[in-house]
Image (cartoon, rainbow, N blue to C red):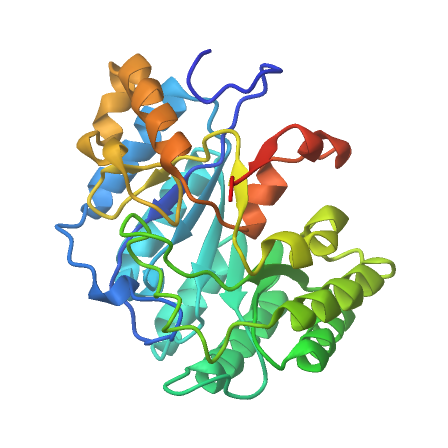
Amino acid sequence: MPLLLDDNGMMINHPTYFLTMKCNLRCNYCKAWKLKRNELSIEEWKDCTEILKRTTNLCFISMMGGEITLLKDGLISIIEHLNSNNVQYAVITNGVIPDHEFRRKLLQKSHNISASFDTLTPAGKSDNTMEKHYHGQEILFQAKRYGVRDVLGLITLKKGKVREVRDIINMLYRNGIWVSVNSIHYAKDKSYDWIASKKDIELVQPSQKEYEEYSEMLMDVKKYNPFMHNPVRYFKELPKYARKLNWKCKYWVPAIDSDGTLRPCIYRTGKLKKFTYLDFEDKLDQIEKVFDEDRKACKGCYWDCCHILNTSPKNEIIAEYQHTEVEE
């Protein structure tokens, strides 16, 4: 099976770039800022894109961190490179951008702004919810005013916030802003390198009953809100998978770490780290073989984007055979 092709010959062409692990917030479910990397230069990231264009059917890149706006003009340079090559992308940010001139430039250049929004009130000790909410809301509304083509609010489901999440989704809907909902994740072993431990997220992880309430509420909202990024299936199966994180992808959604090494997915590192983006040129068969080993070692997640990418844009039934459950 050729690299990045599924059983139907469909190219999986949506890599994630971790442009930097540096961050200006300290969220209780993320420890990306603790990871130290010899990070790629801006020119190396451009070179990475050129290589992927030659070796894969590249059409969309998710750019995340850390907080990628800390790269400032470097990020603008990457965006300009993608624009000139007609590669679509997501700029994923927490919205905390105190440099107003840079913010203006970012909104003028970017075709996408995806901002973490979370909830209206703090969800635990040392939680950055209020700051993320204020700045996330601000940059999303500014992006709409600047005419950014794709504007998306990213919401992580937390304990005791069912009504707040519904209010936020409805508010974004009224302003023509898309929403993507994700369950909170925790590290199931050391390969989940930037995810907090299960103990660290105890104060913010929804209970099983709350996931059932989230599921019912989100399926109801999906009936009238066309700006919901997740498929109905994701909401329907929240009670089944979100708390245990026992859902597994079948195919590779490639991720490239901030130092240029490959990852089996955004959440996990693995044996793939012995390869870099440069190896796409002449080691595709080896990469595919090692990825299959990493995939089998995965202990599961319930990542919203991976669920979407493992479903079909034409219908959701394909999800029936594109994922497996983690064995208990």
* Residue found at x 54% / y 78%: 138
Residue at image x 70%, y 52%? Answer: 237
Q: Is residue 273 above or below residue 220?
A: above
- Relative placement, left or right, of 31 versus 233 is left
- Measured as percent of width and height from the top left, residue 243 is found at 56, 61
**Residue 260 pos. (x, y %):** 22, 39
Q: Position of residue 104 (x, y in %)?
A: 44, 69
- Work out whether residue 148 can be spotted: no
Residue drawn at x 36%, y 86% is 126
- Quarter residue 95 falls in: bottom left
Vertical side of 73 occupied by 328: above or below: above
Relative horizontal placement of residue 248, taking residue 42 as reference (left or right): right
Rendered residue at 55%/47% (across/down):
305
**Which one is nearer the viewer's eye here, 293 or 258?**
293
Q: Residue furthest right?
A: 224
Depth check, front residue: 160 or 116? 160
Question: In the depicted view, which residue is nearer to us: 244 or 177?
Answer: 244
| Residue 187: percent from left, percent from top | 36, 57
Q: How many marks?
A: 0
227 w.r.t. 250: above or below: below
Residue 5 in sight in this render: yes
Query: In this rendering, would 84 be left or right of 225?
Result: left
Single out the residue that lies furthest toward the front. 328
